[in-house]
């Protein structure tokens, strides 16, 4: 720890007063998601449990965020909801980032017609409002978790293509790329071993920021009934369900809604903090 | 307008048209390669085999894909997007009747974003690292990270249910007749007809959904304006203006804001795209009978023609807004605007 506390990166990260709390928040959310079956007060409420005696209870000590119309503990369902959101975010970025970065690097480094074709296709994807595109894909397929991940990935890769494209174009003019070319390194080697490592910091920062926004988009889809289907606890569908019973049982919609806000906020602030560390070259 | 500006405009229009063709191919492919027979999906499980065969024939579903696409383009050029398989009306008629309500909302939200986001951002940049700056940055951050449907529900709960200041849902109160249709936007139609009570009622109904739609854009624009105004304030020519003793207000409005507006306008264009997407959520919460609600219904009923139509219209609108933004940027940027008319 003493080594870490003296490192320049940690100093830069800590200088922004919101970074450390956001790191704690993100670690807490990840821990809740990973250990959901252990930490949730009523882990069985993640499924299709019905307990009409305890239905629609306002917040209390036994149920800090109240219960829903089926009598399930909302806090427990939020914890399991984070689990689904995080899995979704990791899978979506796991699909979108490699595809987007590869296309962007290739287009940026080779230029010419590859550049033209790839970037025009990227433009096409970027000119449909992302949520509308994901909704259209989702609506045409069956609303399952897997299809949801595919639909969100389909709208997410172009942003990484554009990022990697700009990075590759500026990096390929640097001296070290020229040096590698002169000693006869293969194009694949230059892309994978010379340019890619220099793009990692920017891509990594964007991934952290985007984890929050993937959670936001995915919850928007499920809010419209185009995402994970009940009884699976998903934050977006919990808000939609609760919204039907406004204003009397407000806690059913408000707590899952705040849970989304807190999750996105945590990743967003953490991404800002990381950018402070990684942007040291500028 | 200089000739270079015109040329840039023509080029922009041309690439936008290409992009729109690309979008139409993309959405057309998605709509046709889905598993399952579109005709069977449209007719439901109770339809007879004969009916399905008939519908397949009518929708040209037996032809190869490129032929289907060309057929689709030919119809589209003639202003025909096919029949909605759910409402049983032409998709263009449906879109025509639902689009104005959505545009009314998105325009109001865009107006709120510009009218609140920009001044707030300038204020924060002017009083950088002081109390007001911290408050603005916190609120802007909350705006950005909160999904619009969460804002919609929170605003509805606070201002419509608890405070009872504004109506809960819909475009007009019960018993208020819609104004005669001219552009389809109730506020503007009511103004044209001179119906003040209808106008006020329609405007009151727009406040909450408009605000819910605008808040994330306001946050983004405020952040962006703050950053770029702060950057221009650090530029030497501002120092020069201050050294000459120009009034503070003139420096702010004339020298600092204008160059700072360029990145802000780009984001404003992107915000329009986001708001068109977010309208799907906000309209759902406030039972606002717009294009987005129609789109959601179309998606839930797997209404292929309607889905394709809605995506195309939304994309076209987005492209138009972006062209306008590009033109505004070209006009703001003296390097482009004042470029001498060289022989080209």
Image: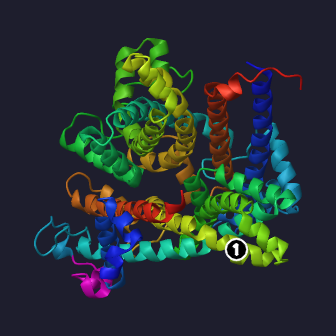
- Up the image or down, B18 lies above or below B202; here it is below
Furthest residue toward bottom: A38
- Up the image or down, B237 lies above or below B157; here it is above
Image location of residue B288, percent across then percent down: 44, 41
The residue sitting at 22% across, 60% down in the picture is: A251
- Label 1 marks a residue whose chain is A
Question: With B241 as the anchor, is A147 left or right in this view?
Answer: right
Q: List the residue tagged with mark 1.
A: A194
Q: Is residue A206 visible?
A: yes
**Which corner quadrant holds the N terminus of chain B?**
top right
Image location of residue B191, percent across then percent down: 45, 15
Callout count: 1
Residue A170, image quadrant: bottom right
Furthest residue toward left: A61
What segment carries the magenta color?
Answer: A36-51
- Up the image or down, A267 lies above or below B139; here it is below
Q: Nearer the viewer, residue A171 or B207?
A: A171
Q: Is residue B49 visible?
A: no
Image location of residue B243, percent across then percent down: 42, 21
Q: Tag 1: Cα neighbours inside 10 Å, few (<14), some, or many (≥20)?
A: some
**Which corner quadrant holds the C terminus of chain B?**
top right
The residue sitting at 38% across, 16% down in the picture is: B247
Question: With B147 as the anchor, is B165 left or right in this view?
Answer: left
Secondary structure under tag 1 reads: helix
The residue sitting at 40% across, 14% down in the picture is: B195
Furthest residue toward top: B194
Q: Indicate whether residue A60 is drawn in magenta.
A: no
């Amino acid at each position: 720890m003493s080594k870490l506390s003296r490192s320049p990166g940690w100093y830069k990260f800590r200088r922004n007063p919101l970074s450390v709390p956001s790191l704690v928040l993100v670690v807490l959310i990840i821990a809740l998601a990973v250990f959901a079956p252990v930490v949730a007060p009523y882990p069985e409420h993640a499924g299709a449990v019905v307990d009409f005696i305890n239905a629609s209870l306002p917040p209390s000590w036994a149920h800090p965020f109240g219960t829903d119309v089926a009598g399930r503990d909302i806090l427990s369902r939020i914890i399991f909801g984070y689990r689904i959101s995080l899995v979704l975010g990791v899978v979506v970025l796991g699909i979108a980032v490699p595809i987007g970065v590869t296309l962007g690097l290739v287009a940026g480094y080779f230029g010419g017609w590859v550049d033209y074709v790839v970037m025009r296709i990227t433009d096409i994807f970027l000119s449909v409002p992302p949520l509308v595109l994901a909704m259209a894909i989702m609506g045409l397929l069956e609303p399952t978790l897997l299809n949801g991940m595919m639909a969100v990935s389909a709208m997410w890769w172009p942003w990484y293509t554009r990022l990697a494209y700009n990075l590759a174009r500026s990096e390929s003019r640097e001296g070290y790329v020229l040096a590698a070319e002169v000693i006869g390194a293969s194009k694949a080697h230059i892309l994978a071993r010379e340019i890619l490592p220099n793009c990692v910091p920017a891509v990594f920062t964007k991934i952290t920021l985007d984890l929050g926004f993937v959670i936001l988009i995915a919850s928007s889809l499920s809010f419209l009934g185009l995402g994970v289907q009940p009884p699976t606890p998903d934050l977006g569908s919990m808000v939609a369900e609760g919204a039907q019973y406004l204003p009397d049982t407000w806690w059913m919609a408000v707590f899952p809604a705040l849970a989304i806000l807190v999750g996105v906020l945590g990743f967003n602030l953490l991404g800002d903090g990381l950018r402070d560390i990684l942007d040291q070259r500028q | 307008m200089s000739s270079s500006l015109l040329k840039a405009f023509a080029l922009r229009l041309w690439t936008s048209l290409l992009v729109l063709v690309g979008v139409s191919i993309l959405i057309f492919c998605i709509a046709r390669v889905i598993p399952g027979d579109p005709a069977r999906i449209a007719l439901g499980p109770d339809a007879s085999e004969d009916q399905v065969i008939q519908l397949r024939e009518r929708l040209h579903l037996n032809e190869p894909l490129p032929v289907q696409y060309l057929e689709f383009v030919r119809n589209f050029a003639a202003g025909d997007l096919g029949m909605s398989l759910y409402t049983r009306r032409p998709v263009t008629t449906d879109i025509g009747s639902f689009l104005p309500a959505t545009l009314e909302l998105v325009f109001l939200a865009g107006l709120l974003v510009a009218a609140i986001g920009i001044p707030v951002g300038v204020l924060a940049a002017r009083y950088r690292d002081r109390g007001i700056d911290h408050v603005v940055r916190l609120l802007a951050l909350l705006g950005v990270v909160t999904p619009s449907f969460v804002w919609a529900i929170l605003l509805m709960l606070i201002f419509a249910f608890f405070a009872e200041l504004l109506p809960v849902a819909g475009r007009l109160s019960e018993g208020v007749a819609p104004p005669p249709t001219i552009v389809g936007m109730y506020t503007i139609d009511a103004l044209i007809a001179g119906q003040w009570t209808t106008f006020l009622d329609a405007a009151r109904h727009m406040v909450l959904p408009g605000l819910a739609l605008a808040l994330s854009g306001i946050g983004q624009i405020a952040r962006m304006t703050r950053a770029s105004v702060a950057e221009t304030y650090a530029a030497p020519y501002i120092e020069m203006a201050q050294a000459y003793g120009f009034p503070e207000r003139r420096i702010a409005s004339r020298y600092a804001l204008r160059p700072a507006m360029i990145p802000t306008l780009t984001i404003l264009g992107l915000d329009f795209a986001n708001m068109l997407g977010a309208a799907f959520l906000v309209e759902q919460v406030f039972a606002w009978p717009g294009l987005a609600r129609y789109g959601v219904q179309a998606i839930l009923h797997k209404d292929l023609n309607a889905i394709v139509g809605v995506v195309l219209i939304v994309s076209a609108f987005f492209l138009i807004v972006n062209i306008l933004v590009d033109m505004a940027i070209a006009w703001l940027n003296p390097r482009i605007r004042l470029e001498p008319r060289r022989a080209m």
